[in-house]
Amino acid sequence: MNNVKTKNIDDSLKLLYKNMLGIIDLFQKKFPNDVDIEQLRRLIIMLNKEEPLVVMKSIKDAVWKIKDHIINENEEYFLSNDRKKEIKNGVQDKYSDLANNLTRKIFSKIRYFSEKEKETIWKKLKAI
């Protein structure tokens, strides 16, 4: 790959990690003893050691399936839908599992966040 493409991939990946970790930070402040959140943080950090294009494609593919609900900030969809069937029908790998676990965790606890915090979460989800 040429240097421009490599830099664009690196920049995109940094932005992806930044937004995912930003969501995790909000959750850790609210739920400091939640081990699942810490586990998600560690998994996201470990992604730095993986193949960047594979990571990005898998996470983007997982998020693409629910993009309309994210864009429209359809909280009700996530609260009323456990997404197991949707996830089962998709191609799964450790990266898409991470994205699915992150969204599942977010919406299992979203009711505990203020409207301002929810705005931040939606903004970061949309950036993913």
Image (cartoon, rainbow, N blue to C red):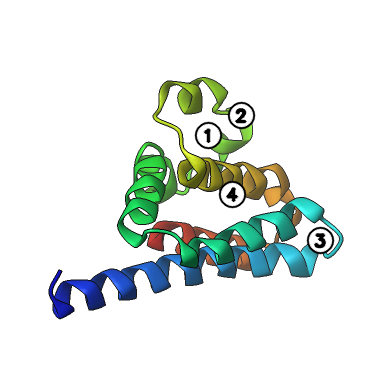
Regarding mark 4 in the picture, which secondary structure is present there? helix
Whether the residues at callouts 2 and 1 have beta carbons within 8 Å, the answer is yes
Gap in angstroms between the C-alphas marked 4 and 2: 16 Å
Gap in angstroms between the C-alphas marked 4 and 1: 15 Å
Mark 2 nearby-residue class (10 Å; few <14, some 14–19, many ≥20): few
Q: Residue 1's x, y, as percent?
A: 15, 69
Whether the residues at callouts 3 and 1 have beta carbons within 8 Å, the answer is no
12, above or below 79, in the image: below
Gap in angstroms between the C-alphas marked 4 and 3: 15 Å
Residue for badge 4: 102
Q: Please tell me which of labels 3 and 1 falls first in the chain.
A: 3
Residue for badge 3: 31
Residue for badge 1: 77
73, above or below 117, in the image: above
Closer to the camera in the image, 104 or 109:
104
Closer to the camera in the image, 32 or 55:
55
Q: Please tell me which of labels 3 and 2 falls first in the chain.
A: 3
Closer to the camera in the image, 121 or 99:
99
Closer to the camera in the image, 73 or 65:
65
Residue type, numbered disc 1: Tyr
Mark 4 nearby-residue class (10 Å; few <14, some 14–19, many ≥20): many
Regarding mark 3 in the picture, which secondary structure is present there? loop
Left or right: 119 as drawn, with respect to 58 = right
Can the viewer see residue 7? yes
Mark 3 nearby-residue class (10 Å; few <14, some 14–19, many ≥20): some
Q: Please tell me which of labels 4 and 2 falls first in the chain.
A: 2
Left or right: 26 as drawn, with respect to 30 = left
Residue type, numbered disc 2: Ser
Residue type, numbered disc 4: Leu
Question: Which mark, residue 80?
Answer: 2
